[in-house]
Amino acid sequence: MRIAVPNKGRIHKPSMELLEKAGLHIEDKGDRKLFARTADPDIMLLFARTADIPEYVNDGAADIGITSLDFINETGVDVELLLDLDFGVAEIVFAVPEDSEIGSPTDVEDQMNIATEFPNITKNYFGDLDIYPDIIEVSGATEMTPQVGIADGIVDLTSTGTTLKVNKLRVIDKILDTSAHLIANKESLKENSKKIREIEMAVESVLRGRKKKYLMMNVPSEKLSAVKEVLPGMSGPTVMNVESEKEIVALHVVVDESEIYQVIQKVRDEGARDILVTSIDRLVP
Ligand SMILES: Nc1ncnc2c1ncn2[C@@H]1O[C@H](COP(=O)(O)OP(=O)(O)OP(=O)(O)O)[C@@H](O)[C@H]1O
Ligand SMILES: O=P(O)(O)OC[C@H]1O[C@H](OP(=O)(O)OP(=O)(O)O)[C@H](O)[C@@H]1O
Ligand SMILES: [Mg+2]
């Protein structure tokens, strides 16, 4: 079983951290850094460019891969989307110079030039509007092409918007929401379903854990029911006796990351002390 992982770029590091947390530690990172063995003898990592991974998985050179939705769309491959990984979150937008007369995508004319790293996404987007501008394919720094006079507009990735702003560009339309995804080859999924689902579950358990916190606290026994009242309604909490002169219990509970701030205030108001918050590496239901 081979998993294709970005060898560089923005989603390289978060992909490696995710696999590591999922239990697929890298055992040796070969000389040429193309392949690596993992803690599971049946699983190898194959390092490749993010943009090439959709094809690698589609062709079966890798059974599974981590890549971005923008490149999956761009290549038009027929792979199975297993999981949205919640990093590499960005948008593909159509943007024009701030002083351009273009105010909507339909203002674009066939003789205009649009620069992009995503020629297919761009062609399809304007094709749907029955507009056929010339696509200038570039491999980076797309935002500067209008300034040097080779493009009337661009189709590119943005997240904070800083690069567009610096280059005095204005967004006309959002074309695609993108993020990193775990994908699988459809044939491999049929033949090796058990193993692939096992990997998917391991990765998903990390994502689930990231949204939760593990909360521990000491509570005087007489205040236990009041503290329990203010805890969000999930299974548990776990209550344990504490060796102490006073009547104290320890209470453990899993809480949504988004609720943690308020929960801590509330349990403290009700008498909980020595409150610890820890992160959860994996949560398997
Ligand atoms: N500004 C951004 N914010 C969030 N995610 C982004 C951003 N830019 C790109 N991405 C995501 O990261 C993916 C990989 O882009 P990145 O530019 O890091 O890699 P690359 O083009 O393979 O490498 P490099 O640019 O170093 O040659 C993109 O396909 C996109 O999904
Ligand atoms: O909205 P922002 O936060 O400014 O991010 C947008 C920029 O990020 C990406 O470039 P990257 O940093 O990957 O460099 P690259 O052009 O060399 O790929 C993308 O191509 C944009 O240029
Ligand atoms: Mg890039």
Image (tube, rainbow, N blue to C red):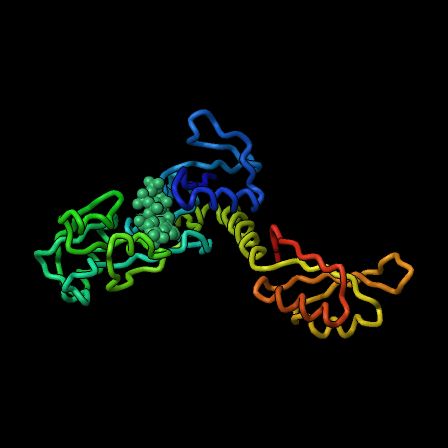
**Where's residue 172, x and y in %?**
24, 64
Q: Residue at x 41, y 37 (%)?
A: 7
Q: Nearer the viewer, residue 206 or 148?
A: 148
Image position of 107 with respect to 2: above or below: below
Image position of 85 with respect to 37: above or below: below
- Does residue 242 appear in the picture of this structure? yes
Q: Residue at x 18, y 67 (%)?
A: 103
Image position of 206 with respect to 254: above or below: above
**Where's residue 174, x and y in %?**
29, 63
Q: Is residue 25 left or right of residue 125?
A: right
Q: Is residue 166 left or right of residue 99?
A: right
Q: Is residue 173 left or right of residue 149?
A: right
- Does residue 53 appear in the picture of this structure? no
Image position of 225 with respect to 47: above or below: below
Q: Residue furthest right?
A: 245
Q: Residue at x 53, y 37 (%)?
A: 42
**Where's residue 51, x and y in %?**
33, 44
Q: Quadrant of residue 102?
A: bottom left
Q: Residue furthest top?
A: 31
Q: Quadrant of residue 110?
A: bottom left
Locate the C terminus by quadrant.
bottom right
Q: Nearer the viewer, residue 120 or 219?
A: 219
Q: How many marks?
A: 0
